[in-house]
Amino acid sequence: VQTEEVENYPGALEGDTGPAIIDRMVAQTKKFGVEKVSDEITEVQLVGKTKVLKAKGGEYRAKSVIIATGAEPRFLGCPGEKEFIGKGVSYCATCDGAFFEGLDIFVIGGGDTAVEEAMFLTKFGRKVYVVHRRDELRAAKSIQEKAFKNEKIEFIWDSVVEEIKGDGLVNEIVLKNKKTGELTNYKAEDGMLGVFIFVGYTPFTKLFEGKLDLERSYIKTDENMKTKIPGVFAAGDVRVKDLRQVVTATADGAIAAVQAEKYLEDLE
């Protein structure tokens, strides 16, 4: 929804934004008589042949449910972060890395994802700085070894982001050393720099706690998007998976829809 430009989705046109692609998808569903309802679900009863969804605007009953509530990146919470999302701040290297060709890139985080994405971003950035709040990485040793050997990666230890600054686009990042309290300003040499944040994701699954099998708060499914409850499926970023992109979410949705149709046919 917040993506300023989409390059990693088949058929996306130059300049396509996340909202623009969503609008086209919604328009396409109207041809098939899909009813769109805006409401907030507050409680779910998923066991049994009839699934009950209680919402602020009423109650919905269905024989099958596909959960696609998604997930959002964990935010740092520093000044400037949300202001510059899509304008230098990103949470997806494969989505946005190419926009920072030849520029300095700062990667925030020290886990597997952060370090792997930092290595990927060396394909584009002039220099990639990995900023970690501790004095050693949490990533697997094998991943660390590859990163330490990469001459385009530099590590900034014991540091957190104090502020992200810019004039329309990010052109400065302020880091604070946790041990000394010292502030260091890094300014873009070419008018812009990239800040990629990888400190985890938060799936929207609170509604399903104690009702579905969860792993690190993500919904567990099989390859056909089936959960442990017959007639209940999950698709997209909300489920346990390795790659979270629009193209994998839509694929999940297609599988879930076909499986839901088969489930309904078997009920008859």
Image (cartoon, rainbow, N blue to C red):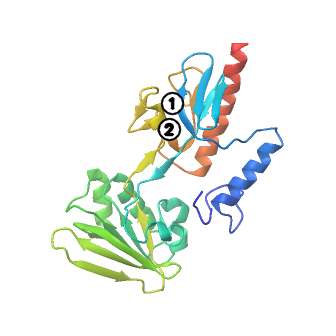
**Residue at the extreme right:** 31
Residue at coordinates 45% horizontally, 77% vertically from top-left? 193
Q: Position of residue 163 (x, y in %)?
A: 36, 73
Q: Which mark is residue 74?
A: none
Q: Where is residue 254 in the image (x, y as percent from the top left)?
A: 67, 37
Residue 107 visible in image: yes
Which residue has dot 2 on it?
239
Secondary structure state at the residue bearing disc 1 = loop
Residue at coordinates 78% horizontally, 50% vertically from top-left? 27
Quadrant that contains the C terminus:
top right
Residue at coordinates 42% horizontally, 60% vertically from top-left? 117
Quadrant position of residue 67: top right
Q: Could you say which is closer to the camera, residue 222 or residue 195? A: 195
**Above/below status of 3 relative to 235:** below
Secondary structure state at the residue bearing disc 2 = loop
Q: Residues within 10 Å of mark 1 (few under 14, many from 20)?
A: many
**Above/below status of 117 relative to 218:** below
Residue at coordinates 50% horizontally, 74% vertically from top-left? 100
Measure how far apart labels 1 and 2 are at the Cα level.
Answer: 7 Å
Q: Position of residue 115 (x, y in %)?
A: 35, 59
Assess whether mark 2 and mark 1 are in contact (beta carbons under 8 angstroms): yes
Residue 224 visible in image: no
Q: Position of residue 196 (x, y in %)?
A: 43, 65
Q: How crowded is mark 2: few (under 14 residues within 10 Å), some or many (20 or more)?
A: many
**Residue at the extreme front:** 57
Quadrant that contains the N terminus:
bottom right
Amino acid tagged 1: Thr
Which residue has dot 1 on it?
221
Q: Could you say which is closer to the camera, residue 6 or residue 22? A: 22
**Residue at the extreme left:** 180
Q: Earlier in the sequence, mark 1 or mark 2?
A: 1
